[in-house]
Image: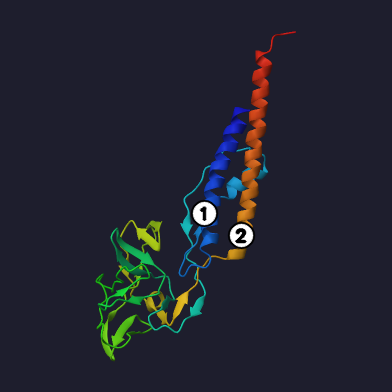
Amino acid sequence: MQSSLYVALSAQVALQKRLDTVAQNVANANTVGYRGTEMKFDSVLSAADAQMTAFVTSKDGVVSLGAGGLIKTGNPLDVALKGQGWLSVQTPAGRMYTRDGRIQLTTSGMLVSMRGHPVLDAGGAPMQVDPNGPTPQIAEDGTVTQNSERVGVLGVFVFDSDAKLSRVEGGFIADKAAIAATDPAKSSMASGYVEESNVNAIKETARLIYVQRAFDEAASTIQSVESGLKSAIQSLGSPAS
């Protein structure tokens, strides 16, 4: 009976982690450039359906690399990355990588993210234009021009396959520096567009309901086992008739 309790508890802990992940995906279904998180919890759900016959352990989430749809904005400073690359911005905590291409222009002429962080070029330096000049234009290869003159190139970065990404507000921080993409298939972008979240809201909502039911089943199992243990203890403590 104790084993059943431990199994149910381990399932509930793992399912709670998945609930949190799916809920976060649903909450960001309309966030520009958002990359959903996928978790490998098939064993958790099947174990719950099989009345908890095996111990359950949770696994780390994996960032989904599927592309989101493109939304036309008409803003020349908006860019949607077409490949698997990432824009890089400089934050107080270090370099952050994002798919949110809503670039802003400060009064000093610096290109920054929606959160005010400097957007970096391929060499990792902030992008600067003439604050008194016309609106900069961004080409498909990331080249930034102003008054038909080349100012620089937006950096598009890719990660090694073994890089670990930690999600932070607005993007990701990697455990190792990304490298500037040289393959046009990974570094091209569409100006005047932004990328939607790659989260399928309908699918994730259905998953949320399914995982919630599995979580409730695990909780019910725990209550049942605890009730059985309580009855057994009371029975052992009762005087023999």
Image quarter where the N terminus lies is top right
Query: Which residue: 62% across, 39% down?
Result: 219
The type of residue carrying mark 2 is Thr
Q: Is residue 56 visible?
A: no
State the residue in front, 39 or 31.
Answer: 31
Query: Which residue: 64% across, 47% down?
Result: 214
Report x, y in % for residue 33: 45, 69
On screen, residue 80 versus residue 131, left or right, reads right
Give the number of the disc on residue 205. Answer: 2
Q: Residue furthest front?
A: 107
Number of on-image labels: 2
Q: Is residue 45 visible?
A: yes
Give the number of the disc on residue 21. Answer: 1
State the residue in front, 75 or 83.
Answer: 75
| Label 2, residues with CA under 10 Å away: few <14, some 14-19, many ≥20 | some
Q: In what element is the residue under mark 1?
A: helix
The type of residue carrying mark 1 is Thr
Q: Picture quarter containing residue 22? A: bottom right
Image quarter where the C terminus lies is top right
